[in-house]
Amino acid sequence: MPVVPPPAVPPSAPVPVVLAGARGHGRWHLANLRRLQEAGLVELAGICEPAPLTEEEFGGPLPEQSADLGALLDTTGAQAAVICTPIPTHTDLALTAARRGAHLLLEKPPAPSYAEFRRMADGVAEAEVACQIGFQSLGSHAVPAIRELVAQDAIGEVTGVGGAGAWVRDEEYFRRSPWAGRRRLDGADVVDGALTNPLAHAVATALALGDCTRAEDVTGIETELARANDIEADDTSCVRVTTAAGRRITVAATLCAERPGEPYVVVHGTRGRITFWYKQDRVLLQRAGHGPEEYDHGRTDLLENLLDHLRTGAALLVPPETTGAFMRVVEAIRRAPDPAALPGTAWQRIAAERRRVVPGVDALVTAAADTLSLYSELGAPWAPATRRSLEGVSTR
């Protein structure tokens, strides 16, 4: 029997929402749902977790709970679902919700492979439900503001886009869950690397500002994947995308920084540059003949945007089709050779902080974003063996 989608959302009634995945990063979504519930926009109707939350964990009386998302949607009648679960589960859970007519906020990365992404996106479209992908940086008002600066010729012709993320993660970070730091688990793709998960926003934001959002906007991808930690996935890596417009987009990332830094994206032009610290919604415009100009912007919460879309028809900020280029990058990383283990001479362990550091990597990350170069082209002695070119790879 076909599932009938829920009725249109009344303008003033709170939308019943279930949260799948309330621990880990899901705690952020739980706090956001509480904020929106206090504002009268949503009702937290249920929580889906394999092991139920306790009242102490939740911080008060619990809503309905179940380990079965479909059953929870059936019993609560929820009209929307927030999915913040392990990467390999995203597609099946999204389709479980979509087939019941529930609209979606799906955490990034949306899927571990391009094939799984297409299965999810096509299934959601067939079910005629709304789906927002959780790249919160793309809700920043800085994104359209930067596009407007480019359209006004503030920095001349755009020559490329760089992204930089130098983060610190201790060894416990890679033991936080069975899938952390894995490329595969029990035969299923995970692809939990620096560029595809913790610093995925740098990649998605760089692609968006380079006008490369759809899968067909990508004509070539080069990757360099390495790891200092004892994991399967990459913790120090870079990617360069060639776009159909002939631009280069290079993003460099590490979880083994000497010092933690704010990740950013920089748009290079023939007469200047625009730097965007996407976690801070802060923009710096530098151009010939002018002093530096700095701007602070607001941000639209992606769940609020989804609710606005359901109530008023407002455009979704991050529908699945605008993450096709990002998923091409995920696919390139998935298909690349396993990340090269850095030699012991290339990293150090800080015992007091229980983490590994790659000396000099902070400067390499910055230089890659500045010059649109890969680590090997910048002279990193450990990089050449990690290079992999995937020019013109089909997404089919």
Image (cartoon, rainbow, N blue to C red):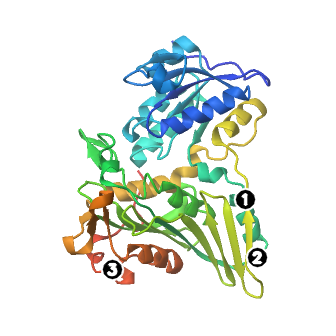
Q: Decide if residue 359 is on the left or right side of residue 203.
A: left
Q: Which residue is mark 2?
A: 153
Tag in front: 3 or 1: 3
User: Image check: 32 left or right of 111?
Assistant: right
Q: The residue under label 3 is which amino acid type?
A: Ala
- Judging depth in this view, the residue of 36 and 159 nearest the camera is 36
Q: Quadrant of residue 386?
A: bottom left
Residue 136 appears in view: yes
Q: Residues within 10 Å of mark 1 (few under 14, many from 20)?
A: few
Comparing labels 3 and 2, the label whose residue is closer to the camera: 3
Q: In the image, what residue type sits under mark 2?
A: Asp
Q: Is residue 156 visible?
A: no
First in sequence: mark 3 vs mark 1: 1
Circles 3 and 2: CB atoms closer than 8 Å: no
Residue position marked by numbered label 1 in the rendering? 144
Q: x and y percent of residue 17 in the render? A: 60, 24
| Residue located beneath label 3 in the image | 380
Packing grade of label 2 (10 A; few <14, some 14-19, many >=20) is some
Circles 3 and 1 in contact, beta carbons < 8 Å: no
Q: How many marks?
A: 3
**Quarter of the rendering containing residue 235:** bottom left
As displayed, is residue 367 above or below residue 116?
below
Q: Secondary structure at mark 1?
A: helix
Mark 1 belongs to which amino acid?
Pro
Furthest residue toward left: 344
